[in-house]
Amino acid sequence: MVARLVLDTVAKSYVAGKGTVTALQNISLSLSEGEFLAIQGPSGSGKSSLLNICGLIDTPSAGQYHLSGQAMGQCSPSQRCEYRRRDIGFIFQHHQLLPAMTVYENVAYPLYLNKVRPKKIKSEVTRLLDKIGLSHRGHHLPVQLSGGERQRVGIARALIKCPQLVIADEPSANLDHKHAHSSLMLMRKLNEQYGASFIIASHDAFVIEHCDSTINLLDGCVVMPS
Amino acid sequence: MNNLLIALRNILRNRTRVFSTVLIIAVGLMALLIGSGFMLSSYDALQEIAMRSEGHVIVLDDESELVRGGTHQQLSLTNWQMIQDQMLDDDRVLRVLPRARFEGLISHGVRSAAFFGTGVDSKEEFRVHGPFLRTTNELDPWLAQNEVPDLMLGSQLARTLDTKTGDFLILKTQNSSGDLSEITVRLAGLYETGIAEVDDHTLMVSLETVRVLMGSDNISQLSIYLEQRENAAEIKNSLQKKYDGVTVQTWTQRAELFDKVKAQYDRIFGVMGVIILVVVFLAISNTIALSIFQRRNEIATLAALGTRPVAIHANFILEACLIGLFATSLGMLLAYLAANAINLSHVMMPAPPGRTEGYQIFIYISWLHYLLSSLVLIATAVVASLMASYNNARVNIADALS
């Protein structure tokens, strides 16, 4: 199986005041095409830092990062922006839907950014909204949706462009069990359909249970590969 | 993806703040338009005064002091009847009025005063001044059957001389030969220009009276009144080419008061315009900066999804444009309503320095001014939002999302 994402001895440290805080050290991992990987660990263990590096939101202080065979270390900010726009989908803990956009527009936005033809955008968004059971909510603003509906829209937005990699940061943290379960099932279903690789940071045992593999982080280090 | 609609929704998310910004810009624009409307009406009135008092085209002798920037006018223009005849045959010309300036002493009984007099065409002179010269009577030409020629006096000069219509007065001057000359005249009526300096010291008699008093057929200037002021330069050039020994000017070269007032008003409204632009700039900067601050999370999300920074700035600029558009539309509407209210309510201004009476405020509504001012304000809003966006929208995605 082709490695979609490879991290090789990645480290991340931040300057805090006069000192330096190490968030990640010697992280090496490989994610296959279509793999569903969970990252678990207590608060402050470096989960978010790792997701930010994997999602090209942040750059590692040391180590190598390859996405679909391409080295990301030397990418300029605009190239990273280009990769994020084209190849990476994000599912945020607080869904982060754009409040001035309707459900339809939020889901369509990544396609619009990738300059997909309006006709195709319409058919793709309609199809996906139908698939996640929110076709009747297309013209509603995020503020008019429930927490579970917002998260489903967030998932649809991440997957609409068929990304190579989906980064999900605590996707079930703000949901009740029922909605957390349905969101995870939706992600899993879309993962199978679209073939995207998933990295999910979560504390939720139910989420971890349904992932293909798990890594544990503690104080910025991988402590126990599953 | 309807960016305009999305920008509109974003604006409406902060209704209170946007409303206050719109109001600030609208009131600023209204003040600017009312001020510039008043300025335009003042320019127009001053142009009218200049054109009506001097004519659209003025023919002077080359030797006239006015040509060299002086104020004294001699009776030096000789061949004026020829020019007058030619001009009266021109369809573009309305009237051609000779004016003969002279000065001396006027006496009524024991009272005497220095005067600046003008010999005028008795029939036509009083038809060109319109509302800027109010008269109690017209000047009769000194016809053969009249024993004594008529005189029109500035209202203040008449008061100084304690004279009334029908009184006889004596004009004394040095004639063109250098001898002392005098003539008895009858006060036919008074006139008032509203300019104290003019009403205090000037008088008018017929051209025939000047001819007898000064012993000369010459005049000081020929004032040509046109159907359309736009033809002034063309007529000036053709006259200047055709006649030697004369200097031909247009009204703009003689409109000193207009030039001075225009320069002053331009400065006043220039400063006012700059102040309003600064206020608009600060209001928009503040609104956009606050909006960016409140939406840092949203900006980070846009960036995480792969939106280019320039597209993020463009969103805020579009919002600023919309705010500017709403505000200027409201400002234009308010200015239009206020201008009409002021014009209809006949508000009077107090007499300005050097004048004896006030005047009604009139606010011009110039759509070109409305449009240009609005465009300048919208451009200011765009620049302000661009700067605010550039300075504040460069967020660290990871920090903003955490």
Image: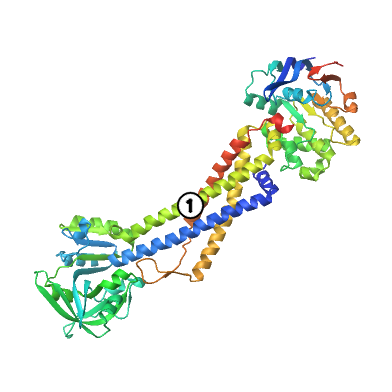
**Dot 1 falls on which chain?**
B
Classify residue A73 as left or right of residue B366.
right
Percent coordinates x, y for residue B263 in the rendering = 37, 55
Q: Which residue sits at x=80%, y=33%?
A: A93
Residue closest to the eye, B176 or A184? B176
Percent coordinates x, y for residue B73 in the rendering = 19, 64
Judge whether residue A220 can be spotted in this image.
Answer: yes
Residue type, label 1: Gly
Q: Which residue sits at x=36%, y=69%?
A: B355
Q: Is residue A130 above or below residue B87?
A: above
Residue closest to the eye, B107 or B152? B107
Quadrant of the rendered structure where residue A115 is? top right
Q: Is residue A218 above or below residue B265?
A: above
Classify residue B71 as left or right of residue B402.
left
For disc 1, the marked residue is B273
Residue closest to the eye, B401 or B158? B158
Q: Which residue sits at x=51%, y=64%?
A: B339
